[in-house]
Image (tube, rainbow, N blue to C red):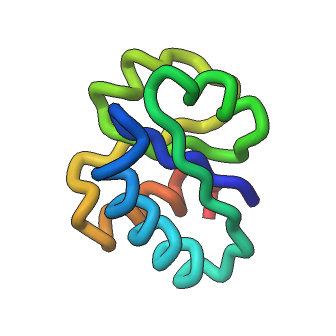
């Protein structure tokens, strides 16, 4: 499974989100590859992803990317990240 973590610049907050996505995927028993993208490259990168995880603001900018988009309110909240990932993949 490929998960795309999207943040504004693809640098800072994506590291936090990626860490929590990795933990969430492990907890859910998923074999996941996590890729990071900034808002400008996310549309193209989403074409190869199974799910996109990002903030509500960036999700609105992305629009329909053809895969489920999980909106995360607090990138630091591992429980929220796990719950949103589980919901996005129907787990």
Please report the residue visible at 40 percent of the width from the left and 16 percent of the height from the top: 61
Q: Nearer the viewer, residue 63 or 86?
A: 63
Residue 60 against residue 6 in the figure, above or below: above
Residue 4 against residue 28 in the figure, above or below: above
Across and down, in percent, residue 26 comes to 58, 82
Q: Is residue 87 left or right of residue 60?
A: right
Across and down, in percent, residue 13 comes to 29, 51
Across and down, in percent, residue 51 comes to 62, 45
Quadrant of image for the C terminus: bottom right
Corner quadrant of residue 65: top right
Quadrant of image for the N terminus: bottom right
Please report the residue visible at 61 percent of the width from the left and 59 percent of the height from the top: 34
Q: How many marks?
A: 0
Please report the residue visible at 23 percent of the width from the left and 64 percent of the height from the top: 76
Q: Is residue 55 left or right of residue 73?
A: right
Please report the residue visible at 37 percent of the width from the left and 19 percent of the height from the top: 60
Across and down, in percent, residue 3 comes to 62, 53
Q: Nearer the viewer, residue 81 or 20?
A: 20
Q: Is residue 51 left or right of residue 84?
A: right
Q: Is residue 61 left or right of residue 80?
A: right
């Amino acid at each position: 499974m490929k998960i795309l973590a999207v943040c504004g610049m693809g640098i800072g907050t994506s590291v936090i989100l990626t860490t929590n996505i990795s933990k969430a995927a492990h907890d859910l028993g998923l074999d996941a590859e996590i890729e990071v993208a900034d808002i400008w490259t996310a549309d193209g990168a989403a074409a190869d992803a199974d799910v996109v995880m990002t903030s509500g603001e960036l999700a609105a900018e992305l629009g329909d990317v053809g895969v489920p988009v999980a909106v995360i309110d607090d990138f630091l909240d591992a429980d929220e990240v796990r719950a949103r990932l589980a919901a996005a993949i129907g787990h």
